[in-house]
Amino acid sequence: MPPAPPAQVLSAGLATPRPAPTHQVVLDGDSLSMEDMLRIVRGEPVTLRLDHGAARRMQGARDGALQALAAGERVYGWNQALGPLKDKPLEPDQQEEFQRRILRSHAAGTGPAVSDGEARLALVLRANAMARATMGVRPALVERMLSLVNAGVTPVIPQVGSLGTGDLQPMAAAGLVITGEQAPARYQGRTAPAYATLKRAGLEPSFPLQAGEALPLISGSGLLTARYVHAIDRATSLESQFEGAFALFMEATRAEQGSLDARTHDERRIPEQQALAARLRALLAGSQWMTDEGRKRLGEDHPRVQDAVSVRAAPHIAATLGQTLREARVIVEREANASTSNPLVFPKTDGGYEFVMGGNWDGAQIGHAVDTLNAQATDVAVLAHELSARLLSNKWSYGLPANLAHPPVGLNSGMVQAQTTAAALIPEMQTRAAPSGVLSRPEKDGQEDHNTMAMASVRNLHDNLDRFETVLAVLLMMDAQGIDLIGKEMRGLSLGTGTAALHHRIRQTVAPLKDDRWMTPDVEKMTELVRSRALQTVVNHIAGPRT
């Protein structure tokens, strides 16, 4: 067995996090950060309020919008109907009733609900967009939305129904909760109709919308962006843990360290690749397994020259995902602090306000970015599967026991079927990595004749991240098994500081496989370990977090 890592290294994976103090977030429409969004989507303690200056600007825009209507301007969603019915005028005494009917008619979604964190963040993102004072809604609407989040009331929002042309259907479900209708909401672990839930949470159960306030709730990218933020967070964790899994793979196969040489990565001039190679070097620092002496222990009596493509190019492949994740943060922060609705209201140079109809609700950029992230996460999962396949082969692994079976090999079948479970997930991921953003089709009598299908993209991405967790868990479990199986041969040689800590943390969850046993619990426990991010903590402690 490999030596245990130093105690100070182990603490990275064992420390119990202290409860975070409540974090204050002030919405002004211009400064919502990725870090704040991550706190909200993760369910960390956050208290939100509307900036006083933003509230004043909102009230000015609201007054100006009403004046423009009184002067005779015809405006979509205010005194004109929606979609194919856009040419139907509405009387002033119909406008408040119209808001309620917009929510009711559009709340036609179905399927499983989004996570509570995503639902809360969607409310915050819409509130922050409204705080830009370009939608003509009352400050009271933003304050109402924030009061729900602060109180812990979460709308139950179905995943299916949006075409990426604004979050019409899912956010209409949220709107019914905000206004206190019968749509379901969660509070303190219990789901009940919104009206009753709001009362139980100590909030006013009814909040009627006024003219023009329904469309800003639903005509935008709030839920899409919230789901994207959550996916970025998940994918970042999986990419970091892949680095740890790859470092363990290199130890188990006594790989050549030359592929991590800073000089070759500097010559490629890709910052994320350079940083990733540096993190791998940090995880492997001090390894004596990945040396000529380590390779001789299992019979390699001539130079290996170079390892396979999956080993030499792993930093390049994973760095491509890392670069996309870094770019995603830029996209998200820009989207979170933008006016993503239609229509918008602006002050005129000669006084007063005017409405402008446009397409700022469109989710095309996020949809295509999500498709790219899905493709790259899938590619890294494919790479993880290819690496796990190498561990099964005595030839490809440079002398590990076939199937990673404990002696007697043959009587014991080892981990071949655990690896097959990962293999079974790969075609599912590849199928769902096809871009939905190119699948537009016209709807609503041609009024919405191009649709980004971005919600389909983000659903596929989250489904694939679920699969990636298991594929990565299998590789990690097999890495640790390979290291244990040759521990006697490698006695006296040390693993790297980071890989020793990772191996120890895995062994706290899953015991080495000796005689064959029921493998499903092992796969499930390892998948849960990946999902818990405990291994990400170890990687970041040794190698530093991704930036």
Image: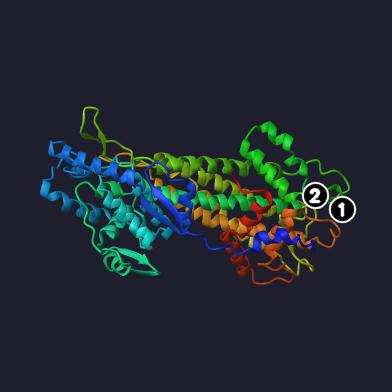
Q: Quadrant of the image for the C terminus? A: top right
Numbered tag placed on residue 465 in the rendering: none
Furthest residue toward front: 52
Q: Amino acid at mark 1?
A: Gly
Location of residue 290 in the rendering, given as x and y in whole percent from the top left corner: 80, 49
Q: Residue at x 72, y 68 (%)?
A: 513
Residue that numbered label 2 is attached to: 290
The answer to whether mark 1 and mark 2 are in CB contact below 8 A is no
Location of residue 273 in the rendering, given as x and y in whole percent from the top left corner: 64, 39
Residue that numbered label 1 is attached to: 299
Q: Amino acid at mark 2?
A: Met
Q: Residue at x 66, y 32 (%)?
A: 268
Closer to the observer: label 1 or label 2?
2
- Between 261 and 96, the one lying in front of the other is 96
- Residue 248 seen: yes
- Between 373 and 419, the one lying in front of the other is 373
Cα distance between the residues tagged 1 and 2: 14 Å
Furthest residue toward right: 301
* Residue 182 occupies quadrant: bottom left
